[in-house]
Image (spheres, rainbow, N blue to C red):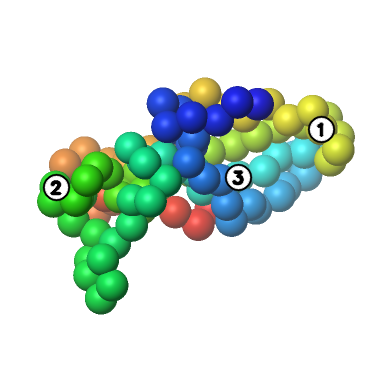
Amino acid sequence: GVRSASLWDGLTQHNPAPVLAPDGQFVIFYMGSTADNASAKVPPGGVADCGKAIGGSYSVCNQRIGIAVSPSPKGPWQRSQSPVIDVGPPGSWDDLFTANP
């Protein structure tokens, strides 16, 4: 489908973890992220500080875990409209991003 920065996983989807569910559905857990622009990245040797991102959000600061389901490995795939594992509340151990399902 159409991808855009307005979607929680609109910039990138990667690290798929496929699973065959007990009901026979094919499930892929994946990391997704978005940012204000495709060039958002951490400066060389730097650390992502989401509160001090230069020129917009760092995509790493928006990583979440999503899920897509299909009756066949060939699709069609139905992706989640929101992350299945989101970040925790401010100050928690997982308040920056979730990754690697």
Q: Where is mark 2, residue-wise? A: 51
Q: Decide: is 44 above or below 25.
A: below
Q: Give the SS element for disc 3.
A: strand
Using the numbered discs, state the Cα–Cα distance from disc 3 to disc 2 in whole angstroms: 28 Å
Q: Where is mark 3, residue-wise? A: 29
Label 1: few (<14), some (14–19) or many (≥20) C-alpha neighbours in 10 Å: few
In this rendering, position of residue 87 left or right of residue 71: left
Q: What is the quadrant of residue 22 in the picture? A: top right
**Residue 44 shows in the view:** yes
- Which amino acid, by three-letter code, is at mark 1? Gly
Precedes in sequence: disc 3 or disc 1: 3
Whether label 3 touches label 1, CB < 8 Å: no
Residue extending farthest bottom: 45
- Which amino acid, by three-letter code, is at mark 3? Phe
Precedes in sequence: disc 2 or disc 1: 2
Label number found at residue 75 = 1
Using the numbered discs, state the Cα–Cα distance from disc 2 to disc 1 in whole angstroms: 39 Å
Q: Decide: is 43 above or below 62.
A: below
Label 2: few (<14), some (14–19) or many (≥20) C-alpha neighbours in 10 Å: few
Which residue is more in the foreground, 64 or 33? 33
Residue 67 image offset from top left, x and y in percent: 59, 37
Residue 55 image offset from top left, x and y in percent: 22, 46
Q: Decide: is 49 above or below 2.
A: below
Residue 63 image offset from top left, x and y in percent: 40, 47
Using the numbered discs, state the Cα–Cα distance from disc 3 to disc 1 in whole angstroms: 15 Å
Q: Residue at x 21, y 38 (%)?
A: 89
Q: Give the SS element for disc 2.
A: helix
Between disc 3 and disc 1, the foreground one is 1
Residue 23 image offset from top left, x and y in percent: 79, 32
- Which amino acid, by three-letter code, is at mark 2? Gly
